[in-house]
Image (tube, rainbow, N blue to C red):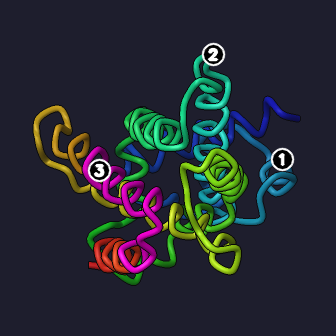
Amino acid sequence: MAADKEKIIDHFIHDVSLGGEMPKSVFSFCKAHKLKEADFYEHFSNFKALEKAVWNDLFTAVAQIVENDEVFNEYNARERYLAYCFTLVEQLKKNLTFYRISANTNDLKEMLNSPGIKALRKSKSFFQNLVEFGIDNDQIKSPDILSGQLPKIFQMHVGFVIKYFLNDESEGFSQTDQAIEKSVKLLFDALENSLLGSVIDFSKFMGKSVLA
């Protein structure tokens, strides 16, 4: 069963990347890859559900790669989050054409409603653990009343990173690297020094950057 699911996902990523759009129908998709429609619907209700699964797998894989790194436990909160951002970019590169089509970063409304952004909103555990670790080690300073909102700020920043990277036209994506380093520095400088106003302003900036 798992193998069939992975085959469907792989075929879907390939077809979208090659054709530049979603397949015309589940029937035509299954026929092209000699699959039974029943097998497709056993795993996914439609292409949107399949598309969201690709993004869910991406965020799950990034967290697992970072957390399984032998040096992860030696990192402070800032280093852990930097590792997450750079690992995310490397994973996006593997199927960059697909993610650019799926995210549709040239259309504001489409991007906000894209399966990728919806999957990101539900990908919380890494960010919750990061905030708890940072607070416990005095690397993130926040009143209890606001600590529950901090994972959302990190999610907003990840959205900013995704949008920036998918639109980056610089050689070797060097501008993305700089954007990650500078924005993470600003974010943690504010978090480490209890500059809550700066954190809020920064989150608003990220929101505008993601929405722009």
The alpha-carbon separation of the residues under discs 3 and 1 comes to 35 Å
Given the image, on which type of amino acid does mark 3 rest? Phe
Category of crowding for the residue at label 2, using alpha-carbon neighbours closer than 10 angstroms: few (below 14), some (14–19), many (at least 20):
few
- Secondary structure category for the residue under label 2: loop
User: Horizontal and vertical percent for residue 126?
Assistant: 67, 49
In the rendered structure, does residue 170 fall within the stretch colored magenta?
no
Snapshot quadrant of residue 200: bottom left
**In the depicted view, which residue is nearer to us: 110 or 36?**
110
Counting residues from the start of the chain, the first of labels 3 and 1 encountered is: 1
Q: Is residue 118 left or right of residue 197?
A: right
- Rendering coords of residue 180 (x, y %): 31, 47
Q: Quadrant of residue 131?
A: bottom right
Residue 121 falls left or right of residue 81: right
Neighbours of disc 1 within 10 Å: few (<14), some (14-19), many (20+):
some
Give whichever of 67, 192 is nearer the camera: 192
Residue 39: numbered disc:
1
Residue at (67% x, 33% y) in the render: 64
Is residue 51 or residue 22 the one in the foreground? Answer: 51
Whether the residues at callouts 3 and 1 have beta carbons within 8 Å, the answer is no
The residue beneath circle 2 is 70
Q: Position of residue 49 (x, y in %)?
A: 69, 63
On screen, 104 above or below 8?
below
Q: Quadrant of the C terminus?
A: bottom left
Residue at (51%, 68%) from the top-left corner? 153
Of residues 28 and 105, the one drawn nearer to the viewer in this rendering? 105
Q: Quadrant of the rendered structure where residue 65 is?
A: top right
**Earlier-in-chain disc, 3 versus 2:** 2
**Residue 65, placed above or below residue 108:** above
Q: Which residues are magenta?
A: 180-200
Q: Secondary structure at mark 3?
A: helix
Please name the residue that numbered disc 3 is placed on.
Answer: 165
Q: Is residue 62 visible?
A: yes
